[in-house]
Image (cartoon, coloured by chain):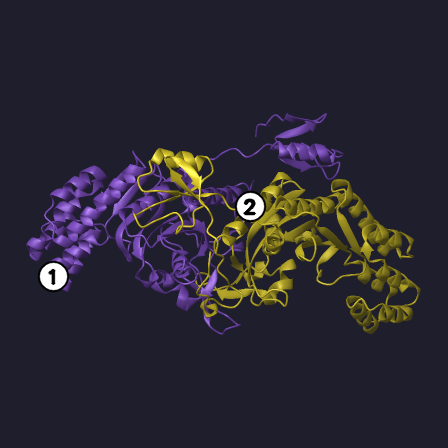
Chain colours: A yellow, B purple
Amino acid sequence: MTDDTPNPALLPAGFADALPPEAEREAAFVEAIMASFALHGYERVKPPLLEFEDSLLAGSGAAIAEQTFRLMDPVSQRMMGLRADTTPQVARIAATRLAAVPRPLRLSYAGQVLRVRGTQLSAARQLPQVGVELIGAESAAADAEVAVVAVEALAAVGIENPSLDITLPTMAPSLLDDAEVSPDLRRRLARALDRKDAAAVAEAAAEGGAALAGLTPLLHAAGPADGALAALAKASLPPAARAIADNAAAVIAAILARAPGLRITLDPVEFRGFRYHTGVAFTLYGPGASGEMGRGGRYLAQGGEPATGISLYPDAMLRAAPSAPGPARLFLPLGTDVATARRLRAEGFVTVAALSAQDDAERLRCSHTLVGGTPVALKRKKV
Amino acid sequence: MTDDTPNPALLPAGFADALPPEAEREAAFVEAIMASFALHGYERVKPPLLEFEDSLLAGSGAAIAEQTFRLMDPVSQRMMGLRADTTPQVARIAATRLAAVPRPLRLSYAGQVLRVRGTQLSAARQLPQVGVELIGAESAAADAEVAVVAVEALAAVGIENPSLDITLPTMAPSLLDDAEVSPDLRRRLARALDRKDAAAVAEAAAEGGAALAGLTPLLHAAGPADGALAALAKASLPPAARAIADNAAAVIAAILARAPGLRITLDPVEFRGFRYHTGVAFTLYGPGASGEMGRGGRYLAQGGEPATGISLYPDAMLRAAPSAPGPARLFLPLGTDVATARRLRAEGFVTVAALSAQDDAERLRCSHTLVGGTPVALKRKKV
């Protein structure tokens, strides 16, 4: 629809009205994604938009405390938060109300999240979020299932040829722990790794001795999974780091067994943005330059339960996916009988009934009109 | 799923987690209702959950100001409200961003609304709300379309034989205006009408003279539409009240032309709960004692545009509708090949893959397991 009178002052920055047909498209996307999750046994939960801030910001929720709108509950006189992320709520449900349900527990969720401020990448302060959590399974197969379920959800809305970026957020900290480096050196190394500054990494690593010898090769190993795994296999690593590398190889093998041909990249020493992850972390990219479609990985859920999950971003997916034409809109002139109208809807037409003699098919943006009981396509006027 | 460890202190009163399978059922209901609206040409809009309180509480939004959570926007330093009703937001969109789209404009919406306090009928402070608004059409046909679209949405989720209660919230005020009664008598009459206290109405009406002679017959007219319309036709009414009665007859005739056999009741002098309505008002009841499924009617949208709409309550509909069995859940033993799994999902099975040798079909609540590549139904254990 046209938007002839935009008034940006009408809504707070970062909040927007979705209009036809975008609002319908977003809803259809979310339900197609959820249906794809459901086919793999993921069952929907729906936590509330508001809950006490103590529980909302517990565990992994602490990471987004600053981004959470807070308000006083006049009933309980306690502070509540408007969720900025659904994942901690799903973890709470798994650990409390669904504590007695046998594991592994497969849960999915869809809903809006609200953030106090937009980010550099997106001004939006209300975003749709959908995702899955697989709770109580520790295997590489569990990580692989979650990654592949996300890839299939993308395919369900027409996004083909995504690429999966795997990072090992515990690898660099593990190497640094093993090397028992000073806090100062640790900070310098973290900053150098974060910037992918190979010269600075090499220089700082040299101060850390033999235990850090693996860092530079791992920095250079980043790239397509097969090459990165070969470099990891050859690298000289202390036992804890070796276990992390072997697990990465097992997860990637399990993913490729389920999704042959999926493009996977591996960056062993990247750790940015994955603060609470305890194993592999995923970032899922759309084709071309369409950007990040989702993010997730392995973590410890409430009570120390092993868990793995991924969140998808329907707004990014909407921009990346091909748009499908809407259904045919059929104008029903005054006096069209009820049974005919019902039959045409059953055949797949959207019907737009005339309510007065002034209504006409073109004004009401119809693609078809009814002539003698039969739908006839209207010629599109050239604009 | 079982809920073995309820902890009511975990969530604020009136907020709840929806668990499997209820969360899925609610989502499926909402989408089925929206799909039913869409078949009649209603196009989805999605206003944000938060907006400036000035715009959120303007017009018909004022009625719900007390029920609206407010919070400060740190970006603009202005007060925002969390919507307690989606209808005023849809009216805002129609009057601003969609002002140039030809009328009649058919819009639909679905989303969560939040309320500061629960009501006597329901403790819930977060509720799903779906509805339609038909903006820019004044005819009885427009009112009838909205009522029938709501009835068809109920049918789309299996709720048959609803009944539609029509009230005329302008009738009693119109009679009182015409009689030019004193403020005191007006208050007494309003209270008596509200209580359906026929004796008090008759006594007070007698003080008002001939212009109020119609009140008592109208009070007794309430009931099935045919009888009520006959009583209205016979009643002696001043011209303004006569026009209201004639319009009610036209709307009811238009509804029955579209939905023959629909149970309609008419209560001409009831006005409770419909403060901003300017024509017929609707309350839609489920079969038996299942209660109110939705509410709406004719009103003036922003800028004085004639409009009619209805909101449905998916939570009430969920309680009233028959529940359908979920899809078959098929356990896939370790080593099931990827192509087989995909084929079985395409056939309609939900697949639950073993991730370790400990996983088994019964623990994972599966209805079927795979034996030699073929799904086999499991016997239900008696509990």
Q: Is residue B17 visible?
A: no
- Point out residue A331 in the picture as x, y percentages from the top left corner: 39, 43
**Residue that carries the numbered disc 2 in the rendered image:** A31
Residue at (43, 47) in percent of width and height: A366
Residue type pointed to by label 2: Glu
Mark 2 element type: helix
- Point out residue A39 in the picture as x, y percentages from the top left corner: 62, 39
How many numbered markers are drawn? 2
Viewer-proximal residue, B343 or B5?
B343
Neighbour tally class for label 1: few under 14, some 14-19, many 20 plus, Cα within 10 Å: some
**Residue that carries the numbered disc 1 in the rendered image:** B180
Q: Is residue A244 visible?
A: yes
Q: Is residue A263 left or right of residue B159?
A: right
- Point out residue B270 in the picture as x, y percentages from the top left corner: 23, 50
Chain letter for mark 2: A
- Point out residue B342 in the picture as x, y percentages from the top left corner: 68, 35
Residue type pointed to by label 1: Glu
Q: Which quadrant of the view contains residue A165?
A: bottom right
Residue at (52, 33) in percent of width and height: B325
Residue at (78, 68) in percent of width and height: A195
Whether labels 1 and 2 belong to a single chain: the reply is: no
Looking at the image, residue A88 lies above or below residue B26: below
Q: Which mark is residue B313?
A: none
Label 1 to label 2: alpha-carbon separation:
56 Å
